Image (tube, grey):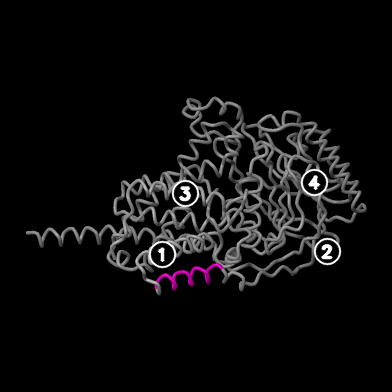
Amino acid sequence: MSPVQPSRWWTLVLAAAGGIATRLAFPEPGWWATSFVGIALLYLALRRDSARWNALVGLVWGLAFFPLLITWADEAVGPVPWLALSITEAGYVAGFAVAWTWARRGTGVWRSAWWQLLTFTLLWVAVEEVRSAWPFGGFPWGRLAFSQADSPIVPFAAWGGVPLVSALVCAVGVLLARVVVTVRRAQVLAASVAALVALVAVLAGLLVPLPTSAQAGSLHVGAVQGNVPGQGLDAFGEREQVLQNHIDGTYALLDQVDQGDLDLVLWPENGTDIDPQVDEEAARLIDDAAVAVGAPLLVGTVQYPPTGGRYNTAVLWEPGVGVVATYTKQHPAPFAEYIPMRSIARRFSSAVDRVTRDMLPGDSPGYVPLDSPRLGRTVGIGDVICFEVAYDGLVRDTVRAGGEVLVVQTNNATFGWSDESTQQLAMSRVRAIEHGRATVQISTVGVSAVIEPNGVVTQSTELFTADQMVTTLPLRTSLTPAARLGGWPAWIAEALAVCAVVAGAVGASRRRADAREVGA
């Protein structure tokens, strides 16, 4: 099947429009259906059989998508790192376009629209996985699945995780593009079939069951959003005030509950940048607040080991006892919490020197055991910190280790009024569905939220306000198919993608050899 090839420059217009349409699918505004349009436009823009040109097309799509998606990076660390990250991520889309060009040259893919659908989708998912892991641990922001928190497709996260949801979004986009192609050729039946399959793929998620009932009792939880005195990188310059804000917020819970009513109180990441394990006054303030509400506190703090560096840590503070359990962030953010290649990075931005002590990674899953006298047992709290919610394996490990609820402790103060917090909330909602766990996203400044195991938000807060939430979370112990499968869907997609590219390259080589023999 020979593709209909649009003019070269028109493909760049299609690519730019596709990148913008896909950006609109993410918060804000979160118009999830535009992700299908964005992928359809990319597919149509890549109809020419030139790897070099298609690399440019992919780059244009990426440059129309990523800078608009992560404007919060400019807010936090300035234009140079923001643009560097955007260009790097756009480069992955360029690489995808090259891989697609090669893979499509295989005889089977070239001749079959359905093989094109499968191959395009596999390649997209594989590239998402690669950029989520490399370099420096990867950057998963912008995966198609994270645009679908309100979509009928998102329940499939419980079956195959984020890779399956991204695959379905991509497949629907390709099907829409096939509708356009076949309509132009007056192939009414083919267009109708493609449109029907796309519609079924979108609506089929409505049939996927998402249980929300408690399997092992429930947990009464309070969550404290304390707010900070300022914004940006200087938001935590007044550490004592930030700590006091969260102390005050903890006491404010007593306006909604009586002492002893709560099983756990949640503070955000950086709820106190004064380590209560070292500072006696911070320890006294936290313990007094814990005693007053009659519940343990999960406190986001920092630790400074004598060997250098620092840890981003959550400590479980038992009233009258102190720290009884901890979790240390496993995936510090490169160029924000630690600076790789500092001497080279400094040439592009002097802001790297504001990170004076590199953050060190923890080495254990985010499982925090909570002794619950009311339930008469230990409850598993699955904890991830900030951007860790974007990484499949880190969240999955907390659940497989015994997490019966999920907690996402985060600090969004450095991102100002940008869309970063709502984009992160969309990820938390997808994770709740993926693992069938009630989830609380608790932030220093918002957006904080309570999320049911089916992804529905039942409570939320506004940005840059002091607020508290009280809720009852269903405790669930069963593992979804996605949690059981682990990384296998992604690994299979990557392996098949490699096979498709190799097969396409070999097929094209054979066709060229046959052509030379005929010419001779």
Q: Do the residues labelled 3 and 4 touch (CB within 8 Å)?
A: no
What residue is at 49 percent from the left and 62 percent from the top?
167
Q: Distance between the residues labelled 3 and 4?
A: 41 Å
- Disc 1 marks a residue whose amino acid type is Arg
Indicate which label's residue lies in the foreground, 2 or 3. 3
Rate crowding at label 2 as few (under 14), some (14 to 19) or many (20 or more) other CA atoms within 10 Å.
Answer: few
Q: Which of marks 3 and 4 is nearer the N terminus?
A: 3
- Disc 2 marks a residue whose amino acid type is Gly
- Disc 4 marks a residue whose amino acid type is Val
Read off the residue under disc 1: 178
User: Quick check: 56 above or below 211?
Assistant: above
Provide residue 304's location: percent of width, then percent of height.
67, 34
Q: Which of marks 3 and 1 is nearer the N terminus?
A: 3
Q: How far apart are marks 2 and 4 (CA)?
A: 25 Å
Read off the residue under disc 3: 17
Rate crowding at label 3 as few (under 14), some (14 to 19) or many (20 or more) other CA atoms within 10 Å.
Answer: many
Read off the residue under disc 4: 224
The magenta segment: 190-202
Classify residue 356 as left or right of residue 41. right
Q: How far apart are marks 1 and 4 (CA)?
A: 49 Å
Q: Distance between the residues labelled 2 and 3?
A: 57 Å
